[in-house]
Structures are given as C-alpha cells and as structure tokens.
Image (cartoon, rainbow, N blue to C red):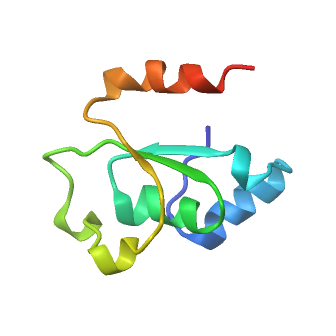
Amino acid sequence: LEVVGEKSEASYRKILGQYNLDPTRFLMVGNSLRSDILPVVRIGGNGVYIPNDQTWFHENASQEEIGDLEYTELERLSQLPTYLDQFRE
C-alpha cells in the first residue's frame, strides 16, 4: 500500500520501479478516473473504477481523456473480492 500526494503517471512509475513491479501486474482501485485509474492504465497497469456520488467534480474525466483506454467499472466496493478471484494463481 502506497499513499501518494500527486497521482500521476510519473509517480506511479516511480512506485512500481521502487518495488521492481511490472505495470501489467499492478491493479489500482479508486473512485477517480482522472487521478486513480487513467494514469495507471496509461502506463500499462490495470484499473478498477468504483464511482462515488461524492467524487469531487475535478476528478471527473471526459470521454476525450478516456479515449480507448480500458478499465473495469464496478458499481460497489463489495463487488471487488469477486472480481479479484479471477486473478488467483
């Protein structure tokens, strides 16, 4: 678990580099497309977006920002354990 002040592609690359992690094996879960999900997906990671009615409007992403980036969207956090089951080795 890492807490970062600036959620950017560079900060996520730095964290992954510190732990020698392959981005394709990294999963970010969050309620902000702009800060949590899109930067991770742009560097080759995986994202699970869980929308929240209380998300700050500056965290919303336009369709232009999203483009053809792929991520998973769940309705509720309670769905996450079932989603993660598919990755068990």
Task: Give residue 88's quadrant in the image.
Answer: top right
Q: Residue at x 72, y 44 (%)?
A: 25
| Left or right side of 78 for 35 | right
Whether residue 44 is situated above or below residue 80 in the rendered picture: below
Q: Image quarter for residue 79?
A: top left
The quarter of the picture where residue 64 lies is: bottom left
Report the side of 56 relative to 10 (left or right): left
Image vertical order of residue 88 relative to residue 12, above or below = above
Q: Is residue 83 left or right of residue 61?
A: right
Q: Residue furthest front?
A: 68
Which residue is pictured at 33% across the width and 21% down the height?
78
Q: Residue furthest left?
A: 53
Foreground of the two, 35 or 26: 26
Q: Nearer the viewer, residue 68 or 38?
A: 68
Indicate the quadrant containing the C terminus: top left, top right, bottom left or bottom right. Answer: top right
Q: Residue at x 58, y 24 (%)?
A: 86
State the residue at coordinates (32%, 42%). Answer: 50
Provide residue 63's location: percent of width, then percent of height: 29, 74
Q: Position of residue 80 (x, y in %)?
A: 42, 26
Q: In the rendered view, tell whether residue 20 sits above or below residue 84.
A: below
User: Which is nearer the eye, 28 or 56?
Assistant: 28
Quadrant where the N terminus sits is top right
The image shows residue 24 at horizontal and vertical percentages of: 71, 51
With 19 as the anchor, is 33 left or right in this view?
A: left
Count the marks: how many? 0
In the rendering, at what x and y percent does residue 22 appear?
79, 51
Viewer-side residue, 74 vs 54: 74
